[in-house]
Every structure is written in C-alpha cells, then in structure tokens.
Image (cartoon, rainbow, N blue to C red):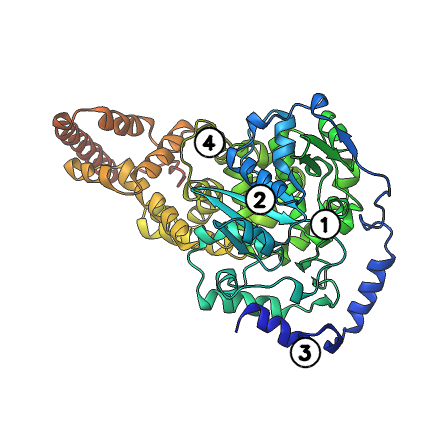
C-alpha cells in the first residue's frame, strides 16, 4: 500500500470533513501546553518585515554560487515563484568558506517544482523535498513551511513518487547510499519503529510529534515570513533573494555571524525537544565555524542530551560522519566532550577517554582526526571505516587488555574485541556492515604487518584493506604502539622497484627468524618477559 493510501486510510477518508481523531489524554495536555507556550518561535515572531541587506552591503556574489543552483533559482523566478538561497550556503559565503552544497527555498509546492524540472525527484515524508539532479550535484528545493498546509488533495502525489519515497524520513536520505538499497524489509522496520511510538497528529496541519515533543512529520506550507521561524540557528536563517541579489535577515543572523556567535531561534529547550539532533548540529557548527554557542542555547544541552537516545540510529550515524569527515573532526571531538554529547554517539569511547586522560590512545585519535581533516582539505578521499577504527581504537584495546596477555596478539582475540566493540557502538549508531567488516580487516592486518613472513608479505600489497591497515600501522608507530622500524620497512617496500621487493622480503624474513630464535633461547633459559607490549 502506498504512503498516501495509508495516510488516507488512517485519517478515515479523503475529505477533511470525514476525518475523525482520538487524541490520548497526555497528548491533549501536550498540545494545549504547546499552544500556550509563548516561547514557540512562531509565537514570538515579530510583525515587522525583515532587514533587507542590499547587494552593495554584503559580500555574496553570484560568481561564488554553483551554476546549477543559479539555474534552479532563475527558472523558479521566471515561473513567477519566489526563490531564495537559504541556510548554510549563505552563512558560509558570508564567513568566507566554500559551501558544500546549495539549498533553495521557494513558495512553489513540491509538485510544482517537479513540473518545472524534468530532472527532479520528490523525496521524504517528514519533510517533503524536491531534489533537482545535475550529474553528481543535487540542488535541494524546499517549500516555505509554516503553521498551516494545503489539503492533501491540493498537493497530488504521483504513483512513481510514492514508490521512490519508500517511507524514509527526508533527514535520512543521505544514508541511502551508505546503508544499502531500500528494501521492503527496511521499509517495514522503519514503519514499525514509527508506529510503535505514540504520536500526536494535527489533522489540519499534517504535523506529528512523539511523546518527547520531537517532530516526526511536518508538511506545513506557508510564506517566507513564516518559514524563517522554522530554522534552527540565526546564522542559518539568512535568505539570498535572486530577484535583486539582496539578503533578507529576520533574526539578526548577519550580526551574529559578524560576532561569530551561534544562537538558536526561539526557546532553546523547545527547539531541542522538537529535534534533539540540533544539539549535535550546535556542536558541529561550533567546530566548523569557530563560533561560540550562546549561553542560553548551551544551557539546556546537559539535561536534554538523553533525548538523542530516541533519534533513529541511522540519522545519528549520518550526523557522526558530518562531525568527523567534513574537515573539522579534530575540533569536533573536544566540543562534543565539553558538551557531554560524545557519550550519546559512542559511550564506550567517551568512557575510555575519561578513564585514560592524555593517554597515547587519545593522542593517536586526535592525530588521526587531524590527518583525516588534512585529506579532506586536500580533496583526497576519506572513509568511515578508518574513522571507526580511530574512534573505537580505545575500546578495542581495552577489551584485548582484559584478556590473558598470552592472547593479546592472537588473531581470534583481536577479531572478538572488534566485534564486541562494534556491537556496543551499534546500540546507538546504525553502522553499515561494509564498514564494520572493513574495521575487522584493518585490525586483522596489524599482526601480519608487524611480523612479515618473507615473500608471502608481498601478497599483502594487493589486499583491498592494505592501505588503510598500513596507515593505521604508521599512526600506531608514531606513538610507540607499534615497531617504527617495521612501519618504515613497509614504506620502503612500496617505494622500491618490483625487482628489489623480493630480496627485501627475504632479508626481513631472516631478521624475523633470528629474532624468534633469540626469544626461544631466552625462554628455554627460564627468562621471563617483562612489560608485554600494549595490544594497541
């Protein structure tokens, strides 16, 4: 059954007058409290128009904007719709950063956007969006949102759109490529997860909340004057108008950017309850922009961070990638720890770092994140597999050290520790199997890289995880957690001509055999090993 059909069946009829709702008492109280809450950002919205910053008074230039985003803006404008660049792209341009993507806001309904662009696909249920494709670049187009919405019959949904939507939240669409294709099983699990939660559905506005106040669905359309109060931070609530190239500022966002201040729109506690991921976004913007979080916006985080436990694990995994794989990971980790948010993503990592402050493992983690940031800034590829190896290095090492020392270097012990650490992390994050299996392979390679066995070691050069395992070995050797001479040997081996690699492998095999023989003689003489090396 399609999403639209299920919606109509749940409402008890397609006509507004035929709908009947039964609200649980707790939700009636919640709804009344919400209506009376003067801290709702829309309730406090001023009646005055926005401050319009003309082109001569700001630094945003069309030469800095993606040509594809300009095509979308111009076509919407030519069709007599309002069209604005909005959100992070405007903020980044004002700060002097290169935007990662460009988002458009318009008064055109999603179906109207699709009629304008043949290369458009409608996605999402919680927030219905239009994605306009230009090769690898996607321009996201969102309709202005407010406190009222058109009736479902006024926004037709074509059959192919229903099939494409697959009942996935719009906020989770970034994960489709990571979590694999959408299957009936995944859609059923997603539907069951949301059906299991008690929700409050507003018949007239298509809004749905869970028991904590988090918005589950929100297809509410309005004007740009309404839309601004649905944004999270003032720095993200600036609108670049393609009609005259001005910037519209309703919330003082331009002043906050100039002061390098991060401030929530409306009552912070209400906004965090609507979407707990805003706490992680606040930490991400602190790290990315170097802004200081406003004290009023920071204060509720400590008591509300437990709400992140109700966020879908796939969405938390996506947010973790944005925190650590977009060029500011080394700054994100201290911010997350200072705000008490790392435990919501990876409690085992937070527990290890808290128990071993300033340890070699913490230094390894920070250096690994710095190396990853450098790769991002250089335009080189990064992988969630290596990130997970860094973040779970401490928990994996702790699990290995809890075993008898005689097992520390056994492959089975290393793999068991990897599996246990990943299972613990998956209680909070949805980690795709290809990344968890890649992590196992990286750690399984470490003993083979530390103890190469003659010419058989040359086969490792063709291993699909060799490069990641080698990078981890270099990082471990930098902090004394692996033999630096062995790491250098692998570096020299890769740089050597193919004809010289065989003799190098033979030489390292002889050295390994002599070392093993010396250790055997010491054991036969009753010698005792002291200070077994860390499994790290």
Give the numbered dot on residue 350. Answer: 2
Of labels 4 and 1, earlier in sequence is 1
Q: Is residue 296 left or right of residue 429?
A: right
Separation of marks 4 and 2 at Cα, in angstroms:
25 Å
Res 191 visible: yes
Q: Quadrant of residue 200?
A: bottom right
Please name the residue shown 40% across and 29% down the image: 480
Residue 285 x/y as whole percent:
64, 36
Separation of marks 2 and 1 at Cα, in angstroms:
22 Å
Give the numbered dot on residue 12. Answer: 3
Res 101 visible: no
Please name the residue shown 36% across and 44% down the image: 443
The answer to whether marks 4 and 3 mark residues whose Cβ atoms lie closer than 8 Å is no
Query: Which of label 2 and label 3 is nearer to you?
Result: 3
Give the numbered dot on residue 376. Answer: 4
Disc 3 is placed on an element classified as: loop
Foreground residue among 431 and 526: 431
Give the numbered dot on residue 272. Answer: 1
Q: Determine whether 66 is above or below 183 in the image.
A: above
Separation of marks 1 and 3 at Cα, in angstroms:
33 Å
Separation of marks 2 and 3 at Cα, in angstroms:
48 Å
Residue 437 x/y as whole percent:
37, 51
Query: Which of label 4 and label 3 is nearer to you?
Result: 3
Of labels 2 and 1, earlier in sequence is 1
């Amino acid at each position: 059954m399609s999403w639209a059909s299920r919606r109509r069946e749940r409402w008890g009829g397609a006509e507004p007058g035929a709908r009947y709702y039964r609200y649980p008492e707790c939700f009636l109280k919640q709804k009344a409290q919400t209506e009376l809450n003067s801290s709702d950002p829309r309730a406090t919205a001023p009646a005055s128009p926005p401050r319009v910053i003309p082109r001569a008074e700001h630094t945003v230039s069309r030469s800095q904007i993606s040509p594809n985003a300009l095509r979308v803006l111009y076509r919407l404008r030519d069709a007599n719709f309002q069209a604005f660049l909005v959100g992070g792209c405007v903020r980044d341009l004002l700060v002097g950063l290169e935007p990662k993507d460009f988002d458009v806001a318009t008064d055109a309904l999603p179906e109207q956007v699709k009629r304008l662009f043949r290369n458009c696909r409608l996605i999402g249920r919680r927030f219905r969006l239009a994605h306009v494709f230009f090769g690898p670049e996607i321009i996201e187009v969102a309709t202005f949102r407010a406190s009222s919405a058109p009736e479902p019959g006024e926004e037709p949904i074509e059959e192919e759109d229903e099939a494409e939507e697959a009942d996935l939240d719009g906020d989770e669409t970034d994960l489709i490529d990571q979590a694999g294709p959408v299957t009936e099983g995944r859609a059923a699990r997603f539907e069951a997860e949301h059906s299991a939660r008690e929700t409050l559905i507003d018949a007239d506005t298509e809004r749905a909340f869970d028991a904590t106040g988090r918005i589950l669905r929100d297809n509410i359309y309005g004007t740009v004057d309404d839309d601004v109060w649905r944004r999270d931070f003032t720095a993200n609530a600036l609108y670049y108008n393609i009609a005259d190239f001005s910037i519209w500022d309703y919330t003082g966002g331009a002043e906050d950017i100039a002061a390098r201040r991060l401030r929530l729109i409306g009552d912070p506690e209400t906004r965090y309850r609507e979407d707990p991921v805003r706490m992680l976004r606040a930490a991400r913007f602190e790290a990315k922009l170097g802004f200081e979080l406003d004290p009023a916006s920071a204060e509720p985080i400590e008591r509300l961070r437990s709400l992140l436990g109700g966020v879908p694990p796939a969405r938390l995994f996506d947010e973790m990638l944005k925190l650590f794989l977009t060029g500011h990971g080394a700054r994100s980790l201290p911010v997350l720890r200072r705000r008490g948010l790392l435990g919501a993503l990876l409690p085992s990592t937070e527990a290890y770092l808290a128990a071993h402050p300033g340890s070699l493992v913490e230094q390894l983690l920070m250096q690994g994140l710095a190396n990853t940031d450098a790769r991002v800034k250089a335009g080189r590829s990064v992988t969630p597999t290596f990130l997970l190896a860094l973040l779970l290095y401490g928990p994996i090492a702790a699990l290995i050290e809890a075993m008898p020392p005689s097992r520390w270097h056994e492959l089975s012990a290393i793999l068991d520790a990897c599996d246990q650490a990943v299972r613990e992390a998956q209680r909070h994050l949805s980690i795709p199997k290809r990344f968890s299996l890649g992590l196992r392979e990286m750690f399984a390679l470490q003993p083979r890289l530390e103890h190469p066995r003659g010419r058989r070691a040359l086969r490792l050069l063709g291993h699909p995880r060799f490069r990641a395992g080698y990078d981890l070995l270099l990082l471990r050797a930098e902090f004394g957690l692996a033999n630096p001479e062995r790491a250098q040997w692998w570096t020299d081996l890769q740089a050597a001509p193919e004809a010289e690699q065989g003799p190098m492998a033979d030489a390292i095999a002889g050295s390994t055999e002599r070392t093993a023989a010396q250790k055997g003689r010491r054991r036969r003489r009753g010698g005792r090993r002291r200070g077994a090396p860390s499994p790290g």
